[in-house]
Structures are given as C-alpha cells and as structure tokens.
Amino acid sequence: AQSVTQLDSQVPVFEEAPVELRCNYSSSVSVYLFWYVQYPNQGLQLLLKYLSGSTLVKGINGFEAEFNKSQTSFHLRKPSVHISDTAEYFCAVSDIYSTLTFGKGTMLLVSP
Amino acid sequence: NAGVTQTPKFRVLKTGQSMTLLCAQDMNHEYMYWYRQDPGMGLRLIHYSVGEGTTAKGEVPDGYNVSRLKKQNFLLGLESAAPSQTSVYFCASSQGTGNGYTFGSGTRLTVV
C-alpha cells in the first residue's frame, strides 16, 4: 500500500520569496512521483514527475523537485514565487502496478 | 484537442435521486479514473478502468457505479444520492501511470 503525507496544509509566503512544499511518501516498491497544481475552480495540471534517473526534476512555471530515496521525500521548490502561483498543490505517488495516490494538498498563498 | 471533458459542470440533486456523470476523452487513453475531492481530504479514487469493458473499485466505491462501454467514455452513476456524496468529482485519463493523468475540469455536485 502507498501513502502520501503533505506536511503543511497552508504555506503563506511573500511575492519573490523562495518556497518549499514538503511531501513524504511510503511505498514498498519502486515509485513514480508527481506534483500537480490546482488553480481555483479548475482541474489538476501536471507540474512535474519523477520516474527514474536524475533526482532533481524540473517542471513548468519554474518549479523543481528533488527525489530523496533515503528520506522518502519529494519536496517541491521555487526560488522566487509570483502572485499567480497562488493555488493548491498536490503530491502523488504510484508504482507500475497501481493507480495514483494523492496527498491532502498544500495551499500556497502568495501575498504582495 | 479537447482532452478530458466532463458533463455536467454543476448539479443539485435531492436525496434519493439518481444521476449519471459523463466523462469523455479524445486522446485514445486506455485508463480512466473517477476521483472525488473534499476539503482537507485531497483526491480519493472512486472507480477506475484499465480498458474498454473493464472497471475496478478504488478507495471509496460505495454508493457509486461505473461503466466503460466505449473506450473514450467513462460514466459514473449515483443510484440514490445522499448528502455525503456532495463533492467535486474529477475524471482523469492516462496512457499508463508513468505518463501522469490528464484531468477534466470537474463536476460540482450538491445533494440536499
């Protein structure tokens, strides 16, 4: 069985500041890891994914994430956020045999 | 290319009424999924399909039924709606877990 823990339900940050959204997972087999973003009243959009290879993954809108197998983490980072990054972010885990399991989400609130 | 289309976008039902939510994808994806999203709960898998004519239960299947008679369509049915089924429902499709999921824009259902 797989599970995902997003450690923060809300992360407030000022515009142009760096941000890190934390995600830890548990799985008994090799995993695929994803970050999705959901803007208000919209569906989920894929930000980035880790399947294998380099542990640093770059995604859209300047976001990146680092896979750390020993710490079972996949934290999302951005060096400088914009007002338009205000949204809910979901971490998700899967393996080759299963469906995606999502975390409960982290609301990123960017203020001027 | 429309991607994943969900109809209707909004619906209000009375307790005990039935309805069907339609999901259509035009990407020739094999896999399709129905999730529900509730505040603070993330996305939870209701049912999914790994191909035309197949369906399987997810994490929260009770009170729902599904059908996948055509590859491009995945229907979610509520036979006797309950207030606990008030939620936002998302459909998604994929060509394999490693590719990530493409989501529809959601259906907001209120059961009164």
Image (tube, coloured by chain):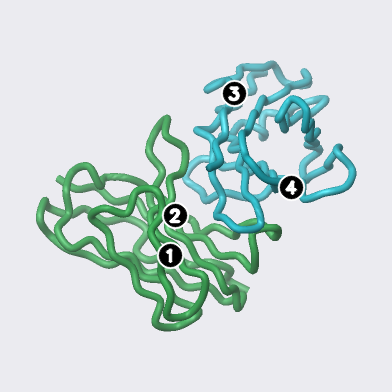
Chain to which the residue tagged by mark 3 belongs: A
Residue placed farthest to the right in the image? A54
Identify residue type, mark 4.
Answer: Lys
Q: Residue at x 70, y 58 (%)?
A: B98
Q: CA distance from mark 4 to mark 3?
A: 23 Å
The secondary element bearing badge 4 is classed as strand
To which residue does mark 2 refer? B90
Q: Is residue B80 above or below residue A46?
A: below
Label 1 near label 2: C-beta < 8 Å?
Answer: yes
Can marks 4 and 3 be said to lie on one chain? Answer: yes
The local secondary structure at tag 1 comes to: strand
Quarter of the image with the C terminus of chain A in it: top right
Q: Which mark is residue A109?
A: 3
Which image quadrant for residue A26?
top right
Q: Earlier in the sequence, mark 4 or mark 3?
A: 4
CA distance separating discs 2 and 1: 8 Å
Residue A66, given in percent of the width and then of the height, sits at: 80, 33
Q: Disc 1 marks which residue?
A: B6
| Image location (x, y in percent) of residue B43 | 46, 43
Q: CA distance from mark 3 to mark 1?
A: 28 Å
Q: Is residue A43 left or right of residue A49?
A: left
Does the residue at mark 1 contact the one at mark 4 (Cβ under 8 Å)?
no
- Find disc 4 in the rendering and name its residue: A49
- Amino acid type, label 3: Leu
Separation of marks 4 and 2 at Cα, in angstroms: 20 Å
Q: Residue at x 34, y 48 (%)?
A: B60
**Chain drawn cyan, letter?**
A
